Amino acid sequence: MTGGGRYPPVMLTPDDVRRIALGQPEAYEADHHGMPSFRVGKKIFCTIHQDQPRAMLKLDPEDQRNLCEADPGVIEAVAGYWGANGSTFVWFEKVEAGRFADLMWMAWAQVAPKRLVALASTRIYKGG
């Protein structure tokens, strides 16, 4: 969400997005058609667009619908096939860092191996 509290959200930068993405267990960065992408295994959970302050996060389609309805103008489905399958734009300059980190976790958990999600969810994960 866009703040709503006493203070405006701190504007995130592409470097902040990169740091949050790489903070997910076993995440790594790779090029995807000229854009930075962040993956776990071979699956992309986030890309950073270079021309606009937005990231694409791979969310569960039902979560995507709920989030888009709750925060229009900040969270929106990608057009077409990709959006129908959960690809979601988040305008990272309009969202609080903690909220963005929660969305990033959701995207990571959507594509990560279930055993890794279970380990990370119980905080057993030590890195690797």
Image (cartoon, helix red, strand yellow):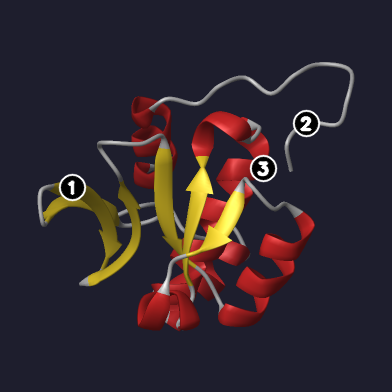
Q: Residues within 10 Å of mark 1 (few under 14, many from 20)?
A: few
Residue beneath the point at 45% across and 74% down: 83
Amino acid under disc 2:
Gly
Q: Which residue is mark 3?
A: 99
Question: Between tags 3 and 2, which lies in front?
Answer: 2
Q: Amino acid at mark 1?
A: Met
Residue corresponding to mark 2: 3
Marks 3 and 2 close (CB-CB < 8 Å): no
Which secondary structure, mark 3? Answer: helix
Discs 3/1, front: 1
From the viewer's perspective, is 72 left or right of 27?
Answer: right
Q: CA distance from mark 3 to mark 1?
A: 23 Å
Identity of the residue drawn at 89% across and 18% down: 6
Task: Give amino acid for label 3.
Answer: Arg
Instruction: Give the residue at x 10% y 57%.
Output: 33
Q: CA distance from mark 2 to mark 1?
A: 28 Å
Q: Nearer the viewer, residue 96 or 21?
A: 96
Residue in the foreground of this view, choosing between 70 and 32: 70
29 in relation to 84, above or below: above
- Residue 35 is labelled as 1
Secondary structure, mark 1, is strand
Question: Do the CB atoms of the residues marked 2 and 1 lie less than 8 Å apart?
Answer: no
Please report whichever mark, 2 or 1, sits nearer to the chain's N-terminal start. Answer: 2
Pick the residue in front: 56 or 98. 56
Badge 2 element:
loop
Query: Quick check: can you spot residue 68?
Result: yes
Residue 12 appears at what percent x and percent y?
A: 50, 26
Q: Earlier in the sequence, mark 3 or mark 2?
A: 2
Q: Quadrant of the N terminus?
A: top right
